[in-house]
Each structure stands twice: as C-alpha cells, then as structure tokens.
Image (cartoon, coloured by chain):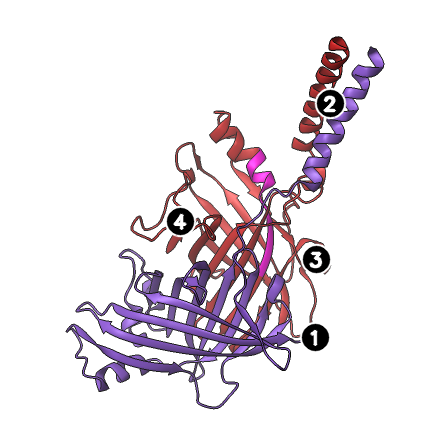
C-alpha cells in the first residue's frame, strides 16, 4: 500500500510538471489567413479599416489635419510636443471579409522634411507586420476640398485617395515578428472616404493591400 | 481494489500539490533582475492606467480603461490583447516621444522554464529623430506571483514597493530586439530592456503609481545590452 501511495505521488508530480511544460496555456483564435498566392511565390493579402467604427484612438499636432483631433476626448499630447509634426492613430484591423482580426497602429511624422507613415499590424495569432510608407500631411484635406468639402461643414460624396507616391516601392513591407519576421514586399494604401461630419469625423474605408514574400 | 484506488488518488493529490508549490516558487521563471550601469539611452514613462494617453482591453478586466470612452477590444480574436499609448520622457523629464504598444498573452507561455509570457509589440516615434519598433517577450509571472495573485485573489496586503524587469526575450540573454525605421534610427538594430518600479498597487483598480524605464541600446553596429 505504501508503494502505491508513493507511485501516486510520482504520478501527481509528473502530471503537474507535464501540464506546466506541455499544456497550451494560450491558444489565440486563429481566423483563416485570407492570402492569395501569386505566380512569383509571393502572397497577396488585403486588410480593411472602417471609419469610424474601427477607430480606437487618434491624436496628433495641428499640422496633421483633420485626423489629428483627439479621439476619444481626453487623449492629449503634452504641450511640449505641440510644435512637433506627429500623428498617432490606432484601429481595429479587419480581413477582406470584414472580420476583426487584429489591431493596427499608424504613426505619421516628418523628419528632415520627409513625411513617413509607419504601420504595425498586430494579429494575435500570427504576429506583427511592419509597413513603411510615405505620406504628405494635408493630402486628404486637399482632396476633400476639391470634392466640395468645406471646413466645419458636413459633407458626403466619394473620394478615392492613394497614399504614397505613384512609383512602385514607395510603400514597403519591412518584416515584423513571428509569422511576418522575414517578409519583404510592397503595399498600397487607399482611402475611400464617403463622408465628413461637422466635427471633422470621417466615414469611409482604408484598404491596405500587401504583396509580400520571404526575404531570406 | 477500492483501497488501492483511494491510496493512489491521495498520493496523486499530494504529488500534484507538491509540484504546484514547486512551480509557484520555481526560480527558473523568476525575475531577470535589475540592470545597472549599461551604456543605453533611457526613456521613462508612467503607468498607462493612471498617467498614459490611452489604454484599452477587452473590458472584462479589473484594469481601468483610459479614457473611459475608449472603444474596447471585445472581439473574439483580439480580446486577449491590450493596447496602450504612453508618452516617453528623457532623463531631464522632458516629453520626447510617443509609444504605441500592443500586448497579448503569448502562445510561448510555458510554466516550467519560461513563465507567463506576453508578446509586446512597440512602435515608438521620437519627433525630430525618427521611429523604431521593439519586439519584446515579457515575463509576467514574478508580478503575478508577488503582487497580483496575493492582493487580488488571496486578499493579502501588498508587500511593496516592487521592482520588476519583465523583459525576457526574444534577444540575447533576455533582451528585447529593436529595429530602427526612420530618421537617425533608420537601419540600426539593437536591444532594449524594460524596468518597472511599482510604488502603489490598489486592491480594486490595480497598479497605481508605476515608474517605468526603457533602456534602449541602438548602436551603429549590432550589439546587445546583455553584453554590457
């Protein structure tokens, strides 16, 4: 009987240690990756962001235009940073079917007269994809004004704006973490805006079309 | 037969309990310790829950949202994620940058040799200088064991203040990896380590005053904080 008790102790020890070591304590829901494999071995994947439903936060300095208005109320940059050129936005990220799959951070800043946009697209089950592109502050406002929008007034219509230069390669995929660590490629960023509220809040969809391949 | 099963069962329970005690005090997954005297640029920031620009999560946690009107990350695929936005200060306590951080429980979590790991993906912009990414594995277990579990779940008084070095990888010797993207950080690789000093922990709302330091080592050539 004593040997059975000792055997039970060992069995309990092994079970607990085995569970600590091998049990999948974290298992993120993983929606199917909606990628299309291209002829050259690359893969194409589209991500969507719907304005205003997917906006989590945005804050920036006045130079950065409409989107720099603090959202939600109470998100404020320190006054010491007021003279800088920076815009920070966060969104929920959707796949091309419209299902939320992650969180996107977008930082826009101007360094030595060059305006850049950096995206970090975090998909919990897959990792984070890093994007680096060009962006000129004020482009959206100019396009809206051309389409008849007047500051301080509500507007509805439709503009389709591509962010970045026309030439290929101005918007680049620069790797990331986990599944995206070795990826390189290009992306296109399009803003389809169909309305602006009186307070300057946008309605529309941002599409990020990525074409990536392994950089190894 | 009945006595055999009962004997084995109680032996099993005892062994299981002993193993749990061993795991709870497991030194392998303990805190990595404070670093001092390293050749690194230091940024400081405060708790995103009390001083940060914004923080949001699934809404199911006791941790507060900031501001309270911020949308929650309630969808099934992101409900284990936490998004925080903090202002980074330099050594003279001047605000110099903004850091976005998405944290989620890591599927590398393993309680025997690694700890309760969090995947931290940072995007940091220092206006006038440039931007960089940080990829960090943070071990939450020391904080859970010493602070959160005793105070929140065992109703014990908090034994603070506490220092933690959560950074546990994925770089050499438990450092986070840094990738410079734009400006003066462009094309530079380096490492980072994060340190927390928690001087207040509220039984209801969680971390109160938290002073955090982010040590950034971003040389022209690739080296590691761990080598300092």
Q: How many marks?
A: 4
- Callout 4 and callout 3 share a chain: yes
Q: Chain under label 1? A: A
Q: Which residue is mark 3?
A: B226
Q: Chain under label 3? A: B
Is residue B140 inside the magenta stretch? yes
As measured in the structure, the alpha-carbon distance from the residue carrying label 3 to the one carrying label 1 is: 26 Å
Q: Which residue is mark 4?
A: B74
Residue B69 versus residue A213: which sits nearer the camera? Answer: A213
Magenta-colored span: B135-145
Quarter of the image that includes the N terminus of chain A? top right
Q: Which chain is purple?
A: A
Q: Is residue B98 visible?
A: no
Q: Chain under label 4? A: B
Residue at x-position 49% and y-position 28%: B153
As measured in the structure, the alpha-carbon distance from the residue carrying label 4 to the one carrying label 3 is: 38 Å
For residue B211, above or below residue B214: above
Q: Is residue B218 left or right of residue B158?
A: right
As measured in the structure, the alpha-carbon distance from the residue carrying label 1 to the one carrying label 4 is: 36 Å
Residue at x-position 60% and y-position 39%: B142
């Amino acid at each position: 009987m004593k040997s059975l008790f000792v055997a039970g102790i060992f069995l309990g020890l092994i079970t607990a240690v085995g569970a600590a070591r091998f049990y999948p304590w974290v298992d993120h829901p993983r929606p199917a990756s909606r990628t299309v494999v291209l002829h050259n071995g690359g893969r194409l994947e589209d991500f969507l962001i719907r304005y205003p439903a997917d906006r989590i936060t945005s804050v920036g300095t006045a130079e950065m235009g409409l989107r720099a208005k603090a959202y939600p109320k109470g998100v404020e940059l320190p006054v010491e940073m007021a003279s800088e050129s920076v815009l920070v936005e966060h969104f929920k990220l959707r796949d091309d079917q419209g299902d939320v799959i992650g969180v996107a951070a977008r930082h826009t800043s101007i360094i030595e007269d060059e305006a850049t946009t950096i995206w970090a697209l975090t998909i919990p089950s897959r990792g984070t994809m890093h994007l680096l592109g060009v962006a000129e502050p004020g482009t959206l406002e100019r396009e809206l004004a051309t389409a008849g929008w007047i500051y301080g007034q509500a507007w509805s219509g439709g503009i389709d704006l591509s962010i970045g230069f026309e030439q290929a390669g101005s918007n680049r995929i620069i790797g990331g973490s986990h599944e995206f660590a070795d990826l390189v490629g290009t992306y296109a960023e399009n803003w389809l805006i169909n309305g602006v509220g009186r307070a300057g809040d946008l309605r529309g969809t941002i599409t990020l079309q990525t074409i990536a391949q392994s950089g190894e | 037969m009945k006595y055999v099963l009962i004997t084995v069962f109680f032996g099993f329970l005892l062994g299981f309990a002993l193993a749990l005690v061993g795991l709870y005090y497991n030194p392998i997954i303990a805190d990595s310790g404070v670093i001092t005297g390293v050749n690194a640029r230091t940024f400081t920031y405060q708790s995103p829950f009390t001083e940060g620009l914004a923080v949001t999560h699934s809404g199911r946690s006791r941790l507060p949202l900031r501001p309270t009107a911020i949308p929650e990350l309630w969808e099934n695929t992101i409900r284990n994620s936490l998004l925080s936005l903090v202002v980074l200060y330099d050594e003279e306590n001047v605000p110099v940058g903004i850091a976005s951080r998405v944290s989620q429980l890591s599927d590398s979590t393993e309680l025997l040799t690694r700890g309760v790991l969090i995947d931290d993906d940072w995007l940091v912009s220092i206006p006038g200088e440039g931007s960089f990414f940080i990829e960090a594995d943070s071990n939450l277990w020391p904080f859970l064991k010493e602070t959160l579990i005793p105070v929140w779940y065992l109703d014990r008084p908090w034994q603070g203040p506490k220092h933690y070095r959560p950074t546990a990888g994925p770089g050499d010797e438990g450092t986070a990896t840094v990738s410079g993207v734009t400006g003066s950080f462009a094309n530079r690789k380096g490492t980072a380590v994060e340190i927390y000093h928690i001087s207040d922990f509220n039984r209801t709302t969680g971390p109160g005053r938290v002073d955090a330091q982010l040590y950034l080592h971003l040389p022209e050539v690739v080296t590691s904080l761990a080598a300092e």
